Image (cartoon, helix red, strand yellow):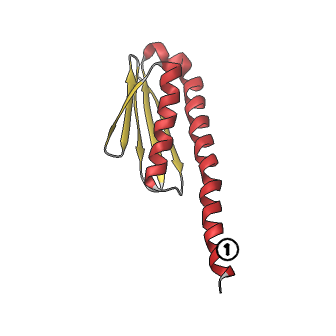
Amino acid sequence: MSDIKYTRKHSLPLAQAKKIAQKTADDLAEEYDLVSEWEGDTLHFHRTGVEGHMHVTDSHIDLNVKLGFLLRPFKARFEQHIEHHLDELLDRAKPSHASAKAAAKKGGKGRA
């Protein structure tokens, strides 16, 4: 089997990071017909020829995927798709989180 390993750091609350992992899996499920389920903080996904998981912590998401023989030719496409999608969702979530912090900070200074 062919392996894909990827770690993406984040500064989001755990619940929000898990929502992003689920959204990534849902989008992959549509395109690749994957089934996913949570076990604690790990989202497992699979179908014939693909087996993987995303382990979510409060600081990073670890992705591990094994592709079977027939899907090896699609490794680069699959890897690019999941990394791009995960990065996009995490980057999109980052500004709103930072904005909330900035607004809270600004609000606190204005009252002094």
The amino acid beneath tag 1 is: Lys
- Report the residue marked by disc 1: 106
- Where residue 105 sits, quadrant-wise, is bottom right
Residue 83: image location, x then y, percent: 57, 36
Q: Is residue 34 left or right of residue 74?
A: left
- Where residue 103 sits, quadrant-wise, is bottom right
Q: Quadrant of the N terminus?
A: top left
Numbered disc 1: secondary structure: helix
Q: Residue at x 40, y 31 (%)?
A: 52
Q: Residue furthest left?
A: 39
Residue neighbourhood size for the residue with mark 1, other residues' Cα within 10 Å, grouped as few (<14), some (14–19), many (≥20): few
Q: Residue furthest front?
A: 111
The image shows a total of numbered marks equal to 1
Residue 109: image location, x then y, percent: 66, 81
Q: Residue at x 51, y 42 (%)?
A: 20
Q: Residue at x 38, y 38 (%)?
A: 43
Q: Quadrant of the C terminus?
A: bottom right
Q: Is residue 69 left or right of residue 38?
A: right
* Placement of 4 over or under 111, stated as above or below: above
Q: Residue furthest bottom?
A: 112
* Placement of 33 over or under 56, stated as above or below: above
